[in-house]
Image (cartoon, rainbow, N blue to C red):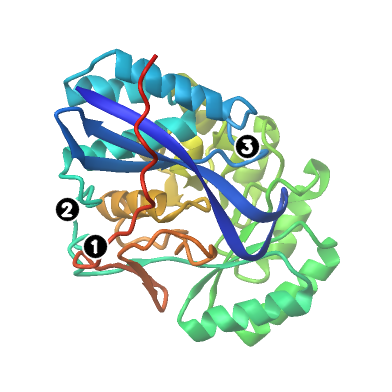
Amino acid sequence: MLQLAATPYTLHFRKPAPTSRGMLTNRTIWLVRAWRSEAPDAIGWGECGPMPGLSRDDTPAFDATVARFCAEFNQAAMTRMEAAQRWASELAAAWPAFAFGVETALRDLATGSRQQLWDTPFTRGEGGLPTHGLIWMDDVDGILRQVEAKVAAGFDVIKLKIGALPFAEELVLLRAVRAAFPAVDLRLDANGAFPPEVALDRLESLAQFGVSLVEQPVSPGQWDVLAELCRHSPVPLALDEELIPLDTPAARAALLAAVRPQYLILKPMLLGGIAASEAWIAEARAHNIGWIVNSLLESAIGLNAICQWTSAVGAGQVHGLGTGALFTNNLQSPLRLESHLLQYDPSAAWQFPPLPPPQELD
């Protein structure tokens, strides 16, 4: 019989991480394990971790809900992988992070419990995945130092978060960045910070810096405003937070038909996992919309699944894939960053945390 368990694990940042939702010093995730009762040593690993203030399943009851779902799964005595995967997909609407963890743990188990979930040149160690260099929120001097370090390290695509400083100061910053690094590809993430009445004016001001895209210029839920901006903005626009509440095919289709953005930002932990993200890709392709995969402060387990999947469906694009190096106690894995390329060494060893003692089911 297929079995599931999930154990909380707290990741500690090397230094406080400033985000649009406050300063993070640690992040709690749940390590999901899948195995067959007749072969308990072959374990498939996954990860789930709602992002506070952002995920649909960010609730105080998440821990208890995960325990209950694992118990229900185990008591269902499933033997077929297809049935277990369908069970996981049915969770995606209300519990997207948990669905991602279960889905990837089951896939790892089905592919040999080696954390090689897809067979691609990336997972064979034959090529890297290009990723952008993420610049954390800071003052102007701090941001310029970060950009300089990323460019020196080999990144040619830089993502800057804007909206935290007065807009006039951000224009000064961008002017300085562009003057110092005229060839760098700039992506901006506004995190919904622009008031609708001035959003188009701000986008026109940003266009002078040769920005390749701006994520989520206004706060989610304003489809009419977004549609107008996507029609008239001189800078391509990408939707990010806008996608999170939409959990049905009809809702996905309605958004893209109404707004018609130039890009989507896909974060599997927020959207319900790999299958849900692939549904977004299919809808985007139907509307001739581009897409970029971003990670979301996952541990090496979740990041590994996202990177391997990305190498299967989005090779050749520059995505936003983290390295896990932000954490002091991340899991040892074959993922490495070399210049702007994320590499996978299939000969390297994984190191998982000790398993908790087995518990009897009620």
In the foreground, 184 or 6: 6
Secondary element at image label 2: loop
- Of labels 3 and 2, the one closer to you: 2
User: In the rendered view, would you say 182 is above or below 239?
Assistant: below
**Within the image, what quadrant is residue 69 found in?**
top left
User: In the rendered view, would you say 219 is above or below 88?
Assistant: below
Residue kind at label 1, given as amino acid type: Phe
The answer to whether any part of residue 143 appears in the image is yes
Residue matched to label 1: 122
> At which x and y percent is residue 61?
60, 25
Residue kind at label 3, given as amino acid type: Ala
Residue matched to label 2: 119
Residue ID at (19%, 69%): 126
Residue ID at (43%, 48%): 291
Secondary element at image label 3: helix
Secondary element at image label 1: loop
Q: How far apart are marks 1 and 2 (CA)?
A: 8 Å
Q: Left of 83 or right of it: where is 259? A: right
Residue matched to label 3: 227
Are the residues tagged 3 and 2 within 8 Å (C-beta)?
no
- Of labels 1 and 3, the one closer to you: 1
Mark 2 Cα-neighbour bin, 10 Å: few <14, some 14–19, many ≥20: few
In the foreground, 246 or 184: 246
First in sequence: mark 3 vs mark 2 = 2
In the foreground, 4 or 252: 4
How many marks the image carries: the answer is 3
**Within the image, what quadrant is residue 169 found in?**
bottom right
